[in-house]
Amino acid sequence: MSAYRHPMTKCEQTPKNPTASSVQTPPIHELAIGAVLALAEAAASHRMNQTIEQKNKALVLEAFDTLFNKRDYAAAERYWSSGYIQHSAHIAPGRDGLFNLIKSTPPTLRYEPGTIVAEGDYVVVHGRFSGFGQPANWIAADILRISDGVLVEHWDVIQDEVTQAQSKSGLPMFGQTFPVL
């Protein structure tokens, strides 16, 4: 009967009962090593997914700041795919539709990000658009799909921001305070 040899530890163990089944189980320390390696692999995979999601959130925040606040259109092109798909009712199709909309707004336009969550290729950011020439700020939930490090698709849900007097809940729609009019 041959001795059991684990390829990683090169440890040998001869069965105590030579008449036992020909199926041999590895020693307990080798099972423990295997379990630790499996857990380490699972943790590394989880960290990789977190890293992708963290990168996607950072990408969206940087892209929005570059376009809406800095208005650096040349730099913003690297964040939006040339084949960008726009589902918003407020924006003409494609990357050009979005960029042209921003070019048409007053220089006072500002975007403030709030809560941001990501899962896989999707990022949702809750934010405030202000200073764009309307009586009320917009509170938006922007949903973006990312592929190969660029924004490729967008949906949004937009509401006019209300004052404290208009809020039935008595709570602000964005942040901790109501807008100052």
Image (cartoon, rainbow, N blue to C red):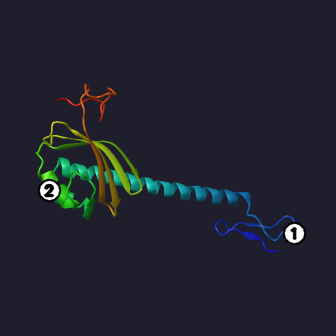
- Residue at 20 percent across and 38 percent down: it is 137
* Residue 92 as seen in the image, left or right of residue 53: left
* Residue 84 as seen in the image, left or right of residue 109: right
Task: Report crowding for label 2: few under 14, some 14 to 19, many 20 or more residues within 10 A (C-alpha).
Answer: few
> Which residue in the protein does label 2 denote?
100
Q: Residue furthest bottom?
A: 1
Q: Disc 1 residue type?
A: Pro
20 and 110: which is toward the camera? 110
Q: Disc 2 residue type?
A: Asn
Q: Earlier in the sequence, mark 1 or mark 2?
A: 1
- Residue at 15 percent across and 43 percent down: it is 132
160 and 123: which is toward the camera? 160
Mark carried by residue 135: none
x and y percentages locating residue 11 in the rendered image: 71, 66
* Residue 39 as seen in the image, left or right of residue 128: right
In the displayed structure, 139 sits above or below 39; it is above
Query: What is the spatial separation of the Cα atoms under label 1 and label 2, in whole angstroms?
Result: 81 Å
* Residue 147 as seen in the image, left or right of residue 65: right
x and y percentages locating residue 36 in the rendered image: 61, 56
> Which residue in the protein does label 1 denote?
18
Find residue 96 and report its image quarter: bottom left
Q: How many marks?
A: 2
Camera-near label (1 vs 2) is 2
The N terminus is located in which quarter? bottom right
Find residue 160 and report its image quarter: top left
- Residue at 70 percent across and 57 percent down: it is 29
- Which secondary structure lies at badge 1? loop
- Which secondary structure lies at badge 2? helix
x and y percentages locating residue 104 in the rendered image: 11, 51
- Residue at 45 percent across and 56 percent down: it is 49
